[in-house]
Amino acid sequence: MSGRIFLANVGANASHRFAGPIFADGTFEFLPIPEGQDLTGPHAVRYRDLTSHYDPGRNLTKYVPERLWAHAAHSDPEFQTFTYGDNCDRSPRASALEGLECGDFLFFLARLERWTGGKPTGTYGFYLVGYLEIETVARSVQAHPSEEVMARFGANAHVLRGLSDTALWDGFWVFAGSARSRRFERAVPVDRQIASSVFTSARGWPWRWEGGRSVLQVIGSYTRSCRCVIDPSLPGHGERADIFWEWVDRHAGTDRS
């Protein structure tokens, strides 16, 4: 795999007071963030409508506070047609995604809570939950897209927002993945071991783990903004890419054929 590796921190996090569950065998459910405004109409996806990846006949309300069951979820990334959207033009957090090119990889990092015996444990960790191999991009979408664009990107949360409220055709970007894109069957842990082996800061320095911060706080801090974390064309990054992909394959059982 020669493409660059980008990382985006996604899904419900500590600020939302809930998180997707991960189970003893590494299987998990991904829970998106709430929409900033409670959208109405047929295009809004509500938390009560989300279904299990492993059992589509079962909803995920067990893992979501009841106050949010009827609230619209910002279901992004979505792993049915493999798209991800962000406000690259307006949000400094996402601006680096403008550099994504065909053949690059956009990995998704999520904060998950360990569940045991059908109950939450209060133990959290960061995990890779899937990736897109970038195939095509819709840039700066400011109006209802063409039929061709809708056919590829119509399931994305940003497009659904625009269909719900025309004010939300707000210049967002949407990325679509190739057939080699994946939603992992088992989540891939991102801990101090793998982070120290393959990741650096935006300035190319090793991550700093001291300062009284927990491992979760350090990982959350360094992944707050989306950016390229491994570029195999740079010195030493080819080896990092090999270590990274081996780690992913070992934990997720990825089939990259």
Image (cartoon, rainbow, N blue to C red):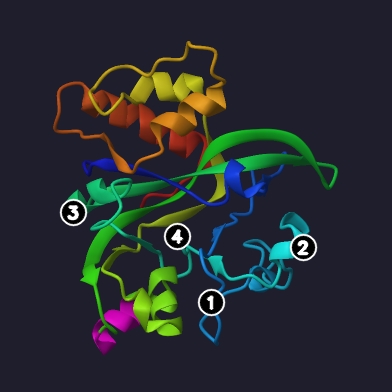
Pointer 4 or 3: first along the chain: 4
- Vertical position of residue 188 compared to residue 62: above or below: above
Q: Are marks 2 and 1 in contact (CB under 8 Å)?
A: no
Residue identified by numbered label 4: 77
Residue identified by numbered label 2: 66
Residue identified by numbered label 1: 39
Check if residue 150 falls in the magenta segment.
Answer: yes
Q: Position of residue 163 (x, y in %)?
A: 41, 83
> What is the C-alpha distance between the residues marked 2 and 1?
18 Å
> What is the C-alpha distance between the residues marked 1 and 3?
32 Å
Residue type, numbered disc 3: Glu
Residue type, numbered disc 4: Pro
- By secondary structure, the bulk of the magenta-drawn segment is best described as helix
Query: Comparing marks 3 and 2, which lies closer to the viewer?
Result: 2
Check if residue 154 falls in the magenta segment.
Answer: no
Q: Residue at x 74, y 63 (%)?
A: 67
Query: Comparing marks 1 and 3, which lies closer to the viewer?
Result: 1
The numbered disc on residue 101 is 3
Pointer 1 or 3: first along the chain: 1
Residue type, numbered disc 2: Glu
Give the magenta part as a residue range. 146-152
